[in-house]
Amino acid sequence: MDIDLLSNIFYAMVRTGTPLLLVALGELICEKSGVLNLGQEGMMLFGAVIGFIVALSTGSLWLGVLLAMAAGMLLALLFAVVALGFNANQVATGLALTIFGVGLSTFVGAAWVGKPLAGFEPIALPWLSELPLLGRMLFAQDLLVYLSFALFALVAWVLLKSRIGLILQAVGENPDAASAMGLPVLRVRTLAVLFGGAMAGLAGAYLSLAYTPMWAENMTAGRGWIALALVVFASWRVLRVLLGAYLFGLASILHLVAQGVGLAIPSNLLAMLPYLATILVLLSRDALKTRLFAPVSLGQPWQPGH
Amino acid sequence: MLLSLEPRGQQSRAMLWLSPLLAAALTLASGSLLFLALGHDPLETLHTLLIAPLADWYGVSELLVKALPILLCALGLALAYQARIWNIGAEGQLLLGALAGSAMALQLLDGDSRWALAWVVLAGTAAGAAWAGLTAWLRTAFNANEILTSIMLNYIALNLLLFFVHGPLKDPAGFNFPESAMFADASRLPLLGAEGRIHAGLYFALLALVAVWVLLQRSFLGFQIKVLGLDRRAAGFVGFREKRLVWLVLLLSGALAGLAGVGEVAGPIGQLVPQVSPGYGYAAITVAFLGRLNPLGILAASLLMALLYLGGENAQVAMNLPQAITQLFQGMVLFFLLACDVLILYRPRLNLRWSRRTAPQNALA
């Protein structure tokens, strides 16, 4: 394998890992606050379709991105009302959100399937992108990928260094104690869910406006679910979310690698790889270990005054 | 806060069954608003969607044809959900059933053995069970979350099916279309009656309905499953073996989904095609919840869901509406159901005069 091929693989790895990174960062914040939102796939799809429709009809990609985030937040708000306000089971509500999001996006996007769109183009930074191996990967991407780098830094700072991060963790680890300290548990959780929705919407927009600029029903192909597994795999640590996302990106583009070394494997079998990889990283012989890092109150309904 | 929730202190039995009806009514109401916004007459659209498909016997038979796979999958899911095992993998288990059943039927193309059909059905059912068994194994031996593994196995199953239908199982005389050869008559589920496509799979579905009802409502095993679902620790204390029960509910629900899948290829379709299922396995999730995980409730809900599928096709042909209306309503009804379920444990209270004192307690977020 020569260095050009390797540089291309790294480039594609980051491109492919970006939507996973975006969703997983949002879900990480959400789970840190103690809420398990399985609706990522639905929010992503709705973001993707709204972003595409807006961008194509207004001609503004950024307006598409913005409204895609709003669309993700809108669905997240539905989740928050039912799961946090009405105290419904979070697993069931998340599933409902995904089923609803799949249906809604297919319905809304039916007339937009297969229309062409000039999406975000890669912007190579002068000099930096010429660096060997890592230059293309880090400095020749489109603007949304750069944005994902910034958002990663932001989320990492919030979780590791900021007061907000402490509040999130307090609410997620022990909502009763947090509430006794005077923290508005449900408001914090609602905001975390909304942030997750915005990130999922952004990830959807990345797919329909940059990665493959078009709309096709179910175009997320399980990325929302993979991102959920990613958070478990990363044991709720932000740096490992980043590494995991790119690792999964790599698993998804192995056909490039296979072509590179001259292997001919049927495409349907190669398409299974990311899903197989997802299953593999969920395995653990030690039951305690899987629970050790999870926010203690994850997925448990909570109401004030109980 | 205008609306506050007051705990009832116990479950309301009435709301337990009123909530699905309320959810259905809210779905119809929001659907009507949607149609109105799209410039269609809501009543006419609802008629096209929900009443016109059942205008004749053929329509009724189509309703049953569509309800069969949904019912079988949802019955299996109900078993798993009663134990709080979130099997989301009915779709993949259904596809594997269809794939294995087809592979068996294609082996038996020339024969007209009386047992051909039995082998085909058995292969499909066993494959569905085995696919769900993977989820059980990953959960019991490797602590992998069953929601995520079963979803991933759905995607893997779909790709596996696509690989086989584009490759090893493709009809050599089929002009390179991704389809298998048509099955021999001996491997097909016989039609019931002269009109319509309703087939002998109906008997399997009825049998499964009774079996699941007996298992859940009348057997000790069903009791164990429910206790496990209500309180894992309590189940452990009285000596119910969690891992064994996890295996059991997953194998059974996989077998039923596999049966649904093989029923599709050996029934109405008659060959292996890339699109065996328009999401029956996912629809079954909604159906299982809507039917309150109760076999009779699920029967009613699966008929309703089948009607939604028929109506979606009808609305596309008659009114040029996207067929995705089916999935949209599926999602809506499940969402409304979960929202309405708040009424089972809480009593809503309207505070017409803004009072800050009642606000913090159980206020809506």
Image: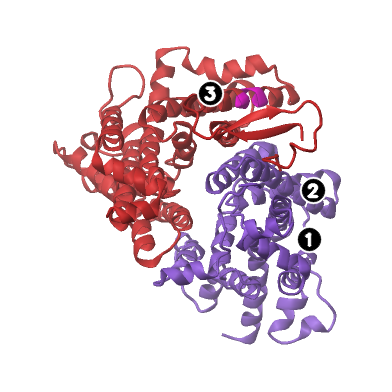
Q: Nearer the viewer, residue B214 or B240?
A: B240
Percent position (x, y) of residue B31? 65, 26
Which amino acid, mark 2?
Answer: Leu
Residue B175 in view of the camera:
no
Using the image, tell me which numbered label, if any, was put on residue A11. Answer: none
Q: Is residue B6 left or right of residue B190?
A: right
A273 within the magenta span: no
Q: Are marks 2 and 3 in contact (CB under 8 Å)?
A: no
Queried whether the magenta region covers residue B29, the answer comes back as yes
What residue is disc 1 on?
Answer: A120
Q: Is residue B281 above or below residue B30?
A: below
Q: Chain of mark 2?
A: A
Q: Position of residue A217 (x, y in %)?
A: 61, 45
Q: Residues within 10 Å of mark 1 (few under 14, many from 20)?
A: some
Look at label 1 and name its amino acid: Phe
Q: Which stretch appears magenta?
A: B26-31
According to the picture, the residue beneath numbered tag 3 turns out to be B21
Q: Are marks 1 and 2 on the same chain?
A: yes
Which quadrant holds the N terminus of chain A?
Answer: bottom right
Q: Nearer the viewer, mark 3 or mark 1?
A: 3
Q: Chain B, which colour?
A: red
- Of B260 and B330, nearer the camera is B330
